């Protein structure tokens, strides 16, 4: 079961962000970078806001992040969410990608466990036709190396 | 543009809760508000030659001009996106047009009948590609919608939660915004929440919407319309109502803010903020005054916590200090040092995308408010915080 239903509205991939969605489908988290100056950017954009180069590359990142902010949504504003509330939405900052932020959700957190600064790692949720990057807390004890 | 343009008239329809106006169209309400504003100014609607609105308005200028029998349409404008952030920008555009000589009598109008058209900004549809052809759905939504970030409440909650983390701001402090607005509405018989006072305790225990926002942190959903009429300042004294001066108008925000209401991609700082700091700097420069000179404030409350951030951005207090700033009755008429949203605002009067806040600013400068601040000479009005573009005005007593 995905964290939120696949029936939520979605925009189709566009020319500016197709590589992002294609990489997710392969369970890769790639963040866009300027090919000229190396600046990270998200959401994807067709040019660098700093040096205006249009050439870009898509670099893999560790998928480790930390919660920058969050909310717990109790009021369902879409019929597909009626059975899902309360659910959380979190901004996850990626320290190894220029601190860009992803809008996402944190799975496997109990009430009161979600907080700013929580260390999380990416998990890929496959829906029928798209893969979404969600996160779960990094539980060091349970992660053998 | 300072003091070159005046607000000559204001008009509104009745305000009713969401879906409460069914017997007249939203377009008719827009026309009724404009007729009321023309009557207030003592101008014929046939003399109106420009229209300005915002927030993806459905009631377009050419149709309004034809319906009202305007002799000529010389100016029409709508602010890009930004919802209620554009309210003061719509006034600014009207003022710029008059100042530039492009038009002589410009209406700013907003009508909302959400029962007839559905909730403003509601994201409908299901599944892949469902939003592909929907106008007004920006690309930034691609990364928000599948994650369940669909409502302005949740979007602003992310901003405010970060502010709480950085500065220790509390939900109870936000309650002062809601309680003051509701108290002011008790003196305003036109307010939807007239007869329904609110306590801090009720605010603190109402049902949760999107943490930290509970029910009374969120703006109303109502039906109704507002309009105002701008003319050259030199012409205003000959008209029927006491003119109100436009001392400053500014719009925009941080260049990097972009679609941060849904992407939350703006650098920190300015994130978390109301995105009003650049607007505030230009506002005070144009007005030739500062926040310390302001007698009464009308600040758009999409959500209570965002008002706190707006107060910081506009310089009423330092960054991070708005929580303490709003305590101890500072916002409450008549004793507070900065009476806020004195007709009840979006939280308690009506949700007309904040144009009702501009009208209340005009009433304060005319001495006609139901919570009249004694000898008030300067009023600040700010549009929806947290969006881009947002906007603000300084109004002055004529």
Image (tube, coloured by chain):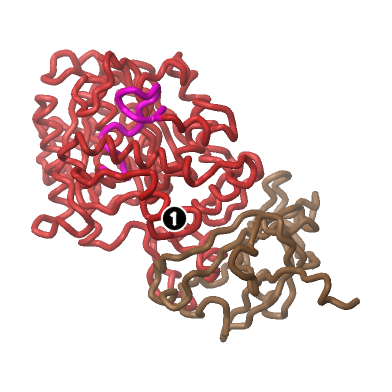
Instruction: Say what secondary structure mark 1 lies in.
Output: helix
* Residue A74 or residue A4, whichever sits in front: A74
Percent coordinates x, y for residue A50 in the rendering: 71, 44
Q: Which residue is rendered at x = 60% and y = 42% of the image?
A: B168
> In the visual, does B318 lie left or right of B341?
right
Percent coordinates x, y for residue B152 in the rendering: 44, 55
Q: Is residue B327 visible?
A: yes
Tell me which segment is drawn in magenta.
B329-348
Magenta part, dominant SS: loop
Quadrant placement of the N terminus of chain B:
top left
* Residue A17 or residue B49, whichever sits in front: A17
Query: Looking at the image, is B300 positioned above or below residue B55?
Result: above
Quadrant placement of the C terminus of chain B:
top left
Q: Quadrant of residue A69?
A: bottom right
Q: Which residue is mark 1?
A: B152
Q: Looking at this rendering, what residue extends furthest in the front direction? A: B201
Residue B346 is one of the magenta-drawn residues: yes
Chain identifier of the red chain: B
Q: Quadrant of residue B33?
A: top left
Hue used for the chain lettered A: brown
* Residue B110 or residue B106, whichever sits in front: B110
Q: Is residue B313 visible?
A: no
Q: Which residue is rendered at x = 39% and y = 60% of the image?
A: B207
Q: Which residue is rendered at x = 45% and y = 19% of the image?
A: B286
Residue B174 is one of the magenta-drawn residues: no
Chain of the residue that carries numbered disc 1 in the rendered image = B
> In the visual, does B331 lie left or right of B231?
right
């Amino acid at each position: 079961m995905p964290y939120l239903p696949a029936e939520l509205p979605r925009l189709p991939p566009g020319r500016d962000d197709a590589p992002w969605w294609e990489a997710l489908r392969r369970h890769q988290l790639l963040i866009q970078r300027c090919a000229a100056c190396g600046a990270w950017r998200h959401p994807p954009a067709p040019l660098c806001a700093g040096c205006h180069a249009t050439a870009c590359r898509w670099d893999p990142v560790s998928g480790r992040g930390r919660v920058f902010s969050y909310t717990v949504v109790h009021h369902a504003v879409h019929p597909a969410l009626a059975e899902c509330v309360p659910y959380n939405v979190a901004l996850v900052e990626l320290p190894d990608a220029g601190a860009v932020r992803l809008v996402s959700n944190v799975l496997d957190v109990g009430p009161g466990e979600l907080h700013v600064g929580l260390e999380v790692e990416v998990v890929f949720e496959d829906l029928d036709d798209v893969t979404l990057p969600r996160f779960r807390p990094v539980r060091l004890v349970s992660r053998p190396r | 543009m300072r003091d070159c343009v005046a607000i000559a008239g204001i008009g509104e329809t009745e305000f009713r809760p969401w879906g409460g106006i069914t017997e007249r169209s939203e377009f008719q309400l827009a026309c009724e508000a404009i007729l009321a504003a023309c009557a207030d100014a003592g101008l014929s609607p046939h003399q109106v030659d420009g229209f300005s609105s915002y927030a993806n308005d459905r009631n377009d200028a050419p149709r309004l001009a034809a319906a009202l029998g305007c002799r000529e349409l010389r100016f029409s404008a709508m602010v890009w996106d930004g919802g209620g952030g554009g309210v003061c920008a719509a006034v600014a555009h009207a003022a710029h047009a008059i100042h530039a000589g492009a038009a002589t009598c410009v209406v700013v109008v907003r009508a909302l009948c959400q029962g007839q058209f559905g909730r403003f900004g509601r994201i409908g549809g299901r599944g892949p590609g469902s939003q592909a052809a929907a106008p007004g759905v920006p690309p930034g939504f691609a990364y928000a919608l599948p994650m369940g970030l669909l409502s302005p409440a949740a979007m602003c909650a992310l901003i405010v939660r970060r502010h709480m983390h950085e500065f220790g701001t509390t939900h109870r402090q936000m309650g002062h915004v809601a309680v003051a607005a509701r108290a002011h509405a008790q003196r305003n018989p036109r307010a939807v929440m007239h007869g329904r006072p609110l306590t801090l305790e009720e605010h603190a225990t109402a049902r949760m919407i999107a943490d930290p926002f509970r029910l009374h942190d969120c703006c109303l959903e109502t039906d109704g319309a507002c309009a105002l009429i701008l003319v050259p300042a030199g012409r205003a004294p000959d008209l029927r109502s006491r003119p109100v001066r436009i001392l400053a108008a500014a719009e925009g925000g941080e260049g990097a803010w972009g679609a941060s209401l849904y992407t939350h991609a703006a650098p920190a700082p300015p994130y978390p903020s109301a995105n009003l700091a650049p607007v505030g700097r230009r506002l005070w420069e144009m007005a030739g005054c500062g926040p310390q000179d302001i007698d009464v404030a009308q600040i758009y409350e999409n959500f209570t916590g965002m008002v706190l951030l707006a107060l910081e951005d506009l310089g009423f207090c330092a960054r991070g200090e708005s929580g303490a700033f709003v305590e101890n009755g500072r916002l409450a008429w008549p004793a507070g040092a900065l009476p806020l949203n004195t007709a009840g605002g979006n939280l308690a009067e009506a949700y007309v995308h904040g144009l009702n806040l501009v009208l209340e600013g005009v009433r304060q400068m005319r001495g006609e408010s139901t919570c009249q601040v004694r000898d008030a000479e300067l009023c600040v009005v700010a549009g929806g915080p947290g969006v881009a573009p947002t906007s603000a005005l300084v109004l002055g007593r004529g």
